Image (tube, rainbow, N blue to C red):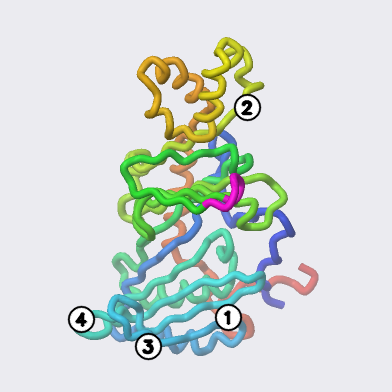
Amino acid sequence: MYIKEEKKAPLGALVYTWKTTAKDGSTYSIDKLLLDFAVKYRAGQGVLDRLAGLLWVEYRHWTSYKMGTFREQFSFELPGDRSFWLGMGLNGPNGVDTRRARLELNPNKVGHSQALWYVFNALWDASGPHERVTVKRWDLAVDLPGSREEYELMKDGRQYEEMRRSASDRTQYLGQRNAPGRCKLYNKTRESGLEQLLTRLELTLDGADCAPDRVAGEWPTVYRVRSEEQLSLEVAALNETDRFILRTLWREPERLSELSRRKRAKLEPLLAACGRVEFDRAAFGEVLLELRRWTERRPETAAPGCPGTWKEIPENG
């Protein structure tokens, strides 16, 4: 028999195709990923012919003529309400650039999919020997232990947006949508129906410009609020008014600038003691190594039931 699609994730658990753990206990992984292929001249039709033989996976196909979009588009539907997208031939002012192709996927959801790697290898085989595949854009996902109420994304020079229905159902954004430098902080427990308490920080990065120094410069200021009990000695030394102000700052750190210089000097250290979510260079280095693997061809090439090198396992495997 042939290897089947991976099993669905256990109910209420967050599953990763790959992850690494930072020093503070947060989990780093690759989320949304855009891969661009430089298809050889007249090789695109061969890819489309191979896709036409994909009878073992559901997919939708449509055609777009809008400038700046891909002419032939495919959405591959996988078990567990998962999918990935393919675009072939970029619509431009001088016609269709048939040498352009793009894959969009979430590695944590479809990274083990046979269908994905069949399509990926078809594109890789049809591309030129130089820069066969490049990472166009990707999201670094940082899963922080704890509830959404415990974390606060601070405003900076980037555009700020917020969607809030309650203290727990709240999403904060920095930066322009779908552009490098975009940050998002939201309730991962609610979004994915998890049993564990997780808050996710996402940072959109340029595939060609994501060196650690560059990412450190785009890393947002995120505070984790601690309880009064954790800072009991310091808080006990404050008068009633200052304790009230400090509680307010823990929930709305951006209001620190409203205080006088004397009050800021007194309360800012206690606010900082709440803890910042720091950028972990070592963990990010592991992420970059994994990102590089997403530009390499996988050995499995043939669809189940077709001649090729698709790995077989015994019936009792």
Q: Amino acid at mark 4?
A: Pro
The residue positioned 36% from the left and 66% from the top of the image is: 133
Q: Nearer the viewer, residue 111 or 267?
A: 267
- Residue 309: quadrant of the picture: bottom right
Q: Which mark is residue 303?
A: 1
User: In front: mark 2 or mark 3?
Assistant: 2
| Residue ID for mark 2 | 227
Distance (Cα) linking label 4 and label 1: 37 Å
Q: Nearer the viewer, residue 83 or 126?
A: 83
Q: Amino acid at mark 1?
A: Ala
Q: Nearer the viewer, residue 55 or 139?
A: 139
**Which residues lie in the magenta part?**
164-169
| Residue ID for mark 3 | 45
Q: Work out whether mark 2 precedes mark 3 in sequence or the reverse, and give the earlier one.
A: 3
User: In front: mark 3 or mark 1?
Assistant: 3
Is residue 40 visible in this depiction of the protein? no
Q: Position of residue 272 (x, y in %)?
A: 48, 25
